[in-house]
Image (tube, rainbow, N blue to C red):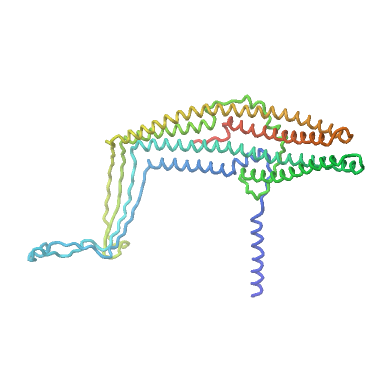
């Protein structure tokens, strides 16, 4: 029996560690750019918090509305007088022959008593309540528009982070290709030098270029790992998860090369930044109404019902225990009469704040127009620069190829070849950066033009 129990215990010890290991299995993701955007809008940390803010605002709205609905409360009280209070009355009340000034100690109440009361409160009219409901709706609208802005920012961040991964990947591919080419050139040049047909400086010049490429390659490999971690963080994916991007830089660039977007326009009033500024103006206007409503009367009604009983012993659950009922109905009217100008001063403050919000709203309108114009210009420049860098790269490749041929034919120096190679490497990086700029600037332009990424639910 003991042997069987020992084997069973060992089996449990082996089983549970395996289960724990399975529970920590690393998740893997393979996402295109569009899949990453869809995933991030649902799972990123900031998007989730923005959605939670809307849910909080919905609860706050109901909290305000509920204040005008019936409120029922109940109270149950039990008291046990461990030492009963004693009162003194003139002894002449019970004994006419008692001496004047003589008092008798008397205990009027019973030792234990219990009571239960239920009260119904109902607000009939309160100007502050009406304005409060309007204010709750405005706060909900603010949360919904904040969600829109958050989603637009999350979308832009995902595109930029995804683009950085593609940029690093493409840079690694080019550095590896360049390093392979320069290594072959170095080997050929070393053989020429060893045969006495070249200068040692030619070998050393190519060695310098190769070392520089190797250093840049190693640095870009590390940058790729950081870019992946940044993309995971933006998407709401744990850093220790595995993530693979399925798009490539050139394809995404062509998808984001959209001349029609340059002609697309929206009214400033539809831009999310303007709508948020408008929400603040509406809130300031509501606060003015709230201060004015405090000068109105407040009317409420209530009704309660209860019963109480007393006894020297705990007999409150006995059928013989007597309870005495009571009930009250009432109406309460509060009328503000005179506040020494305090209400007027508060109202004036809110009116001035509302006036400021109108100026801020007009400022936001013009800022949005400027923002759209700047984003459109940046995107136009990115498209133009992409075409320019594409041509520059083709020219740099031809120049480097010609100098390489001349070098091995002995009619060009290693310095001239090095200059052509440096020019080519710079043109390659400029071309990659131009592709990334097309993607990033289109994302920025879409952010200021997009009004459909999130639609609030109807009440």
| Left or right: 54 as drawn, with respect to 354 | right
Residue 313 lies in what quarter of the image? Answer: bottom left
Q: Quadrant of the N terminus?
A: bottom right
| Left or right: 315 as drawn, with respect to 401 | left
| Left or right: 6 as drawn, with respect to 271 | right
Q: Nearer the viewer, residue 3 or 432?
A: 432
Q: List the single residue furthest toward the top.
A: 263
Q: Is residue 186 visible?
A: yes
**Residue at x-position 19% and y-position 62%:** 87
| Left or right: 385 as drawn, with respect to 107 | right
In the rendered view, tell whether residue 12 sits above or below residue 459.
below
**Residue at x-position 59% and y-position 39%:** 154
Q: Nearer the viewer, residue 27 or 352?
A: 352
Place of residue 180 in the rendered image (x, y in percent of width and height, measured from the top left):
81, 42
Place of residue 253 in the rendered image (x, y in percent of width and height, measured from the top left):
70, 33
Residue 199 lies in what quarter of the image? Answer: top right
Place of residue 329 in the rendered image (x, y in percent of width and height, measured from the top left):
28, 45
In the rendered view, tell whether residue 214 sits above or below residue 102.
above
Q: List the single residue furthest toward the left.
A: 97
Place of residue 224 in the rendered image (x, y in percent of width and height, measured from the top left):
69, 44
**Residue at x-position 42% and y-position 33%:** 284
Residue 256 lies in what quarter of the image? Answer: top right
């Amino acid at each position: 029996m003991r042997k069987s129990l020992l084997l069973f215990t060992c089996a449990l010890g082996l089983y549970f560690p395996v289960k724990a290991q399975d529970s920590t299995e690393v998740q893997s993701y393979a996402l295109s750019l569009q899949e990453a955007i869809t995933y991030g809008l649902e799972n990123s940390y900031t998007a989730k918090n923005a959605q939670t803010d809307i849910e909080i605002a919905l609860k706050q709205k109901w909290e305000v509305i509920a204040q005008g609905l019936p409120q029922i409360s109940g109270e149950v009280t039990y008291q046990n007088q461990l030492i009963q209070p004693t009162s003194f009355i003139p002894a002449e009340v019970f004994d006419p022959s008692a001496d004047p000034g003589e008092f008798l100690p008397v205990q009027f109440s019973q030792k234990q008593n219990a009571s239960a009361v239920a009260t119904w409160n109902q607000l009939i009219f309160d100007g502050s309540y009406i304005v409060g409901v309007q204010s709750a709706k405005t706060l909900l609208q603010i949360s919904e528009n904040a969600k829109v802005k958050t989603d637009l920012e999350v979308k832009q961040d995902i595109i930029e982070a995804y683009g950085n991964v593609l940029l690093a990947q493409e840079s690694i591919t080019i550095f590896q290709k360049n390093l392979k080419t320069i290594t072959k050139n170095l080997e050929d040049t070393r053989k020429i030098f060893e045969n006495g047909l070249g200068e040692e400086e030619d070998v050393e010049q190519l060695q310098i270029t190769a070392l520089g490429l190797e250093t840049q390659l190693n640095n870009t490999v590390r940058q790729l790992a950081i870019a992946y971690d940044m993309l995971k963080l933006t998407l709401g994916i744990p850093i220790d998860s595995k993530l693979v991007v399925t798009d490539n830089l050139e394809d995404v660039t062509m998808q984001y090369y959209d001349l029609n977007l340059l002609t697309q326009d929206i009214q400033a009033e539809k831009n999310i930044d303007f709508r948020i500024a408008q929400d603040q103006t509406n809130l300031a206007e509501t606060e003015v109404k709230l201060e004015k409503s405090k000068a109105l009367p407040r009317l409420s009604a209530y009704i309660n019902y209860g019963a109480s009983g007393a006894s020297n012993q705990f007999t409150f659950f006995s059928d013989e225990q007597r309870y005495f009922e009571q009930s009250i109905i009432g109406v309460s009217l509060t009328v503000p009469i005179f506040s020494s100008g305090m209400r007027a001063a508060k109202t004036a403050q809110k009116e001035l704040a509302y006036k400021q919000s109108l100026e801020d709203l007009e400022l936001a309108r013009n800022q949005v127009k400027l923002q759209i114009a700047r984003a459109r210009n940046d995107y136009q420049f990115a498209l133009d620069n992409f075409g320019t860098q594409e041509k520059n790269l083709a020219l740099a490749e031809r120049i480097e190829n010609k100098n390489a041929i001349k070098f091995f034919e002995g009619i060009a120096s290693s310095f001239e070849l090095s200059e052509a190679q440096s020019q080519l490497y710079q043109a390659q990086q400029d071309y990659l950066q131009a592709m990334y700029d097309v993607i990033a600037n289109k994302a920025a332009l879409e952010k200021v033009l997009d009004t459909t990424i999130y639609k609030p639910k109807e009440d």
